[in-house]
Amino acid sequence: MHVFPGEVWTSVGALKGVLRDAAYRHRPYTLLSPSARAECLGTDSGITDDHPQVDTVGPYDAVVVGLAPSVLDYKHLNTAFRILVGEHENEKRRADPLSPFSTSVTTSRPPLIALHKARYIQASDRALSLGPGPFVAALEEASGTRAQIVGKPTKLFFETVVKSFGDDTLSLAPTETVEGAVMSDGGGKDGSRVRRSGRIAVVGDDVSADLGEGAIELGLWRVLVKTGKYRTGDETREGVVPPDEVCDSFADFVDRFLDQGRFFNPRSSAGV
């Protein structure tokens, strides 16, 4: 399927933007898959310092964590922890007057950045496996640092996507990305927030990692699909805000979405 720039939004793309725009973009210590790392630190990102994963030269200025099972082990996590608390050997060179990286300027601790904090994913064998969330939580707990989450379900991520639809109005034609991404059908269910009729729906198979936090804060129409890592009863788990709608699959949602009478008639649409 051919897609145009701006039609697909991912957490990796959001991370690339953060690293490009932030002052600590030059030397992040990355716990990312090779493809994600290449996309974020590639020559087209404006970052030219293609240092190896285990660097023995200068201090790092951020720790970035994504879904990368091959590097989410004790060795790499401990290195990330040491960077966050200023105990990494590269950081100590900053205080060495004989080091080329020596400086008398007091610097703040490197930030911890995570693509997302999903607790689990569905692996290729269709069984649930650990996501990056538990590893990010471990680094937060050990270092006393709160991670900056750049992907869904943060409010900023969803706001960025919604704004890309246009300043004045949203297209009535659905805009499809990937499972867990945003779709527009004409606005948001809360007219006071988006100043237009209709709704913006976010569709995903994880009621927390896809449909939580920002999706709730922004009043998006939260649609849970019973595919992927969905498990029976997810929508009624303790502590979970129930979704606005549950569909058997994304295709099922599309069929409902295309039901003009149901989706575009305010009087027959729930929550409008």
Image (cartoon, helix red, strand yellow):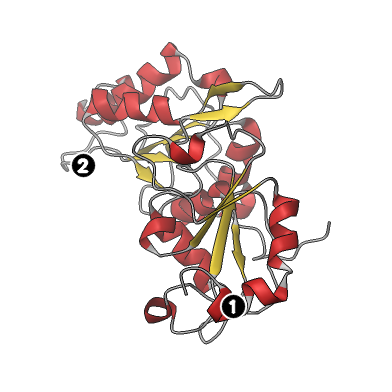
Outermost residue toward the top?
Answer: 74
The correct choice, above or below, for 151 with respect to 257 in the image is above
Q: Disc 2 marks which amino acid?
A: Ser
In the image, 198: left or right of 153? right
Q: Residue furthest right?
A: 1
Quadrant into which the N terminus falls: bottom right
The residue at the point 77 percent across, 62 percent down is 3
Tell me the quarter of the picture where residue 80 sits: top left
Residue placed most toward the observer, 63 or 148: 148
Q: Give residue 228's quadrant in the image.
A: top right
Tag 2 secondary structure: loop
Disc nearer the start of the sequence (1/2): 2
Residue carrying label 1: 186
Task: Specify the quadrant of the image occupied by residue 183.
Answer: bottom right
Q: Position of residue 69 (x, y in %)?
A: 56, 21
Identify the residue at image location x=25%, y=31%. Answer: 94
Left or right of residue 79: residue 235:
right
The label shown at residue 160 is none
What SS does tag 1 mark? loop
Q: Separation of disc 1 and disc 2 at Cα?
A: 44 Å
Residue at which label 2 appears: 108
In the rendered image, the residue lying farthest to the front is 268
| Figure disc tally | 2
- Where in the figure is residue 29, as x and y percent of width and height? 44, 32
Residue count near mark 1 (Cα–Cα under 10 Å), binned few <14, some 14–19, many ≥20: many
Residue 33 drawn at (x, y percent): 60, 31
Residue 170 rendering spot, x and y as whole percentages: 59, 80
Residue 120 visible at all: yes
Q: Left or right of 260: which side holds 120?
A: left
Residue 172 vertical placement versus 114 (above, below): below
Q: Residues within 10 Å of mark 2 (few under 14, many from 20)?
A: few
